[in-house]
Image: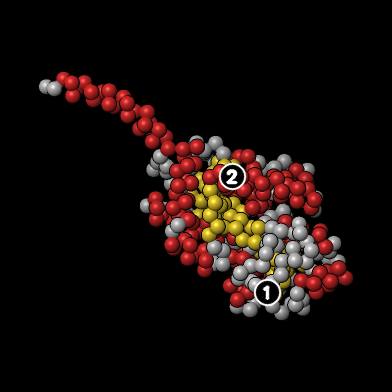
Amino acid sequence: MNIGQFGRRPLLAASLAPALAQAQGAAWPQGRAVSMVVAFPPGGQADVSARPTAAAMERILGSAVPVVNRAGASGALGNAYVARAAPDGSTLLMALSSVLILPESERVNGRQPQYEVEQLAPIARITADPTVLVVRADAPWRDIDAFIADARTRPGAISYSSSGNYSALHTPMAMFANAVGIDMLHVPFQGGAPALTALLSGTVQALASGTGPIMQHIRAGRLRALASWAAERLPGLPDVPTFREKGLEEVQYTIWAGVFAPAATPAPVQEEIRRCLAQAARDPEANRALEAAGSPMAYLDGDAFRGFVAEDHARLVQVVRRIGRVE
């Protein structure tokens, strides 16, 4: 027997043990089923972003990544569900920008928040769509100036839908209304899809939406875009002015969708999720699906996404405070 060779085996195993333990600690999903929660009904912006992303993750992981719609309370129910979920990487959230707004909106209205932003760890941004104000194609307003003029002469007469109080569809419209001094009738729904349906059916007269859910209806001549909350005109809507062009510098809003995990999820597991999402962001099928939906990939992760979230959070808290209490 070669005693020297035999004696080296325990030493080799001992030297590899920390590396193996670290690798095992970072492994994800470790045989667990992974689901992606969307805090709204199917068909809205979060859902539009979640489904191609989850499908790409399935191809990478070789196992199902179901999208679970947990709608309610303008998205707060689904957000809170993930904030309280086991921090093992098995439950992810495809959140909209409103995830940063809802806790502060609860405080403004004298209620206890269902979750805090700090309970969620930002992993990666998937899409980022400037918001567009749309009306039905048969509406009387041909441009945003006519819309504002009519709203000023008929306070409370023009109605608009949203995905709930302080949601990603309500907040930009409230910003606009406050900036130009108009009063409109807000009709909240449980998500972006029913809010869009309400506009298409004529139940309401206007809607603020990300481009993803509405572009097909604009192209088909069912909806007319009047203005956008973008910093500059959108390539897909070159004839539609921005509010910034109208002298409303502060009226800017982007509906972004990003993946979050429970904040206590270990850093190695968060990194594995990020790696998977970075690969999903390069997936041709996912990119084609998002492009076809009018909501192209706008991927951002790591420190860049965490910084983006922190900056947007600080800005949106001030926006909510300016909007104030909503009955």
Task: For the N terminus, give its image quadrant.
Answer: top left
Q: Label 1: which residue?
A: 239
Viewed as shown, does residue 40 lie left or right of 249?
left
The amino acid beneath tag 2 is Arg
Give the mark, 2 or 1, whose residue is nearer the N terminus. Answer: 1
Instruction: Give the numbered dot on residue 306.
Output: 2
Residue most extreme to the left: 1
Quarter of image, res 15? top left
Residue 94 seen in this snapshot: no
At x 40%, y 33%, the residue is 22
Q: Nearer the viewer, residue 44 or 60?
A: 60
At x 23%, y 25%, the residue is 9
Viewed as shown, does residue 265 lie left or right of 10?
right
Q: Mark 2 falls on what kind of element?
A: helix
The span from disc 2 to disc 1 (Cα, nearest Å) is 34 Å
Q: Nearer the viewer, residue 199 or 9?
A: 9
At x 35%, y 32%, the residue is 20
Tag count: 2
Q: Is residue 74 above or below residue 181?
A: above
Residue 110 seen in this snapshot: yes
Residue 165 position, x and y percent, is 72, 55
Viewed as shown, does residue 12 lie left or right of 216?
left
Q: Nearer the viewer, residue 98 or 204?
A: 98
Viewed as shown, does residue 147 lie left or right of 21?
right
Q: Residues within 10 Å of mark 2 (few under 14, many from 20)?
A: some
At x 47%, y 45%, the residue is 273
Quarter of image, res 80? top right
Q: Mark 1 falls on what kind of element?
A: loop
The amino acid beneath tag 1 is Asp
